[in-house]
């Protein structure tokens, strides 16, 4: 059973998310709600803000504050890994060429990060290489 204050907080966050989408075009619809609520609560505590209304004032009047909010609340993933057209192009144009090589070593700093390595391995396996 949810506390009344928790339900009110969630309603206020939902309204704020709609305002952010309308004002700035950022869409939080794909985020798990529990995660969004938790991240916003943490952001409020970090900035010593007492309410969503207080947060709203800063978000819509200070662009630097809004950027900081986005960095703290959103899940930071490079754009290419969110773009389905990137993966389609990768599968159709790049992986067939790479599969002609006997061995492939990739060593850029971004690819060496564990999560990116797993994404590359996933793409590679899906292509059947």
Image (spheres, rainbow, N blue to C red):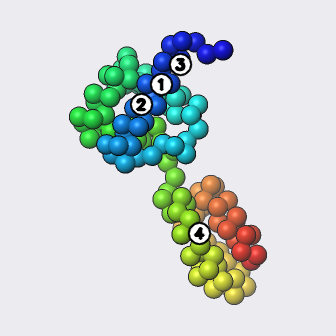
Q: Can residue 118 be seen in this view?
A: yes
**N-term-proximal mark, 4 vs 2:** 2
Mark 1: which secondary structure? helix
Whether residues under marks 3 and 1 lie with C-beta atoms below 8 angstroms apart, the answer is yes
Residue that mark 1 sits on? 11
Q: Which residue is drawn at 38% across and 23% down?
A: 52
Q: Quadrant of the C terminus?
A: bottom right
Mark 4: which secondary structure? helix
Mark 3: which secondary structure? helix
**N-term-proximal mark, 4 vs 1:** 1
For residue 41, side relative to residue 58 (left or right): right
Q: Residue at x 28, y 40 (%)?
A: 64
Q: Which residue lies furthest to the left in this view?
A: 61
**N-term-proximal mark, 2 vs 3:** 3
Q: Residue at x 27, y 35 (%)?
A: 60
Residue that mark 4 sits on? 87
Q: Can residue 68 be seen in this view?
A: no
Q: Distance between the residues labelled 4 and 2?
A: 34 Å
The circle drawn on residue 7 is 3
For label 2, the crowd category at 10 Å Cα-Cα, with few meaning under 14, some 14 to 19 and many 20 or more, is few
Which is more toward the observer, 93 or 129?
93
Q: Distance between the residues labelled 3 and 1?
A: 6 Å
For label 3, the crowd category at 10 Å Cα-Cα, with few meaning under 14, some 14 to 19 and many 20 or more, is few
Residue 80 pos. (x, y %): 51, 63
Q: How far apart are marks 2 and 1 (CA)?
A: 6 Å
Please name which of the two marks, 4 or 1, marks the residue nearer to the observer: 1
Residue 6 pos. (x, y %): 53, 17
Residue that mark 2 sits on? 15
Whether residues under marks 2 and 1 lie with C-beta atoms below 8 angstroms apart, the answer is yes
Q: In this view, does 121 lie above or below 29?
A: below
């Amino acid at each position: 059973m949810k506390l009344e204050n928790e339900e009110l907080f969630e309603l206020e966050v939902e309204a704020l998310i709609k305002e952010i989408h309308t004002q700035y075009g950022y869409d939080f619809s794909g985020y798990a709600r529990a995660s969004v609520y938790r991240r916003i609560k943490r952001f409020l505590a970090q900035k010593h803000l007492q309410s969503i209304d207080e947060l709203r004032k800063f978000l819509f009047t200070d662009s630097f504050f809004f950027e900081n909010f986005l960095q703290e609340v959103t899940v930071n993933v490079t754009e290419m890994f969110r773009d389905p057209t990137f993966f389609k192009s990768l599968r159709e144009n790049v992986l067939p060429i790479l599969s002609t090589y006997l061995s492939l070593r990739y060593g850029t700093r971004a690819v060496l990060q564990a999560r990116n390595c797993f994404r590359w391995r996933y793409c590679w396996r899906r292509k059947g290489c």
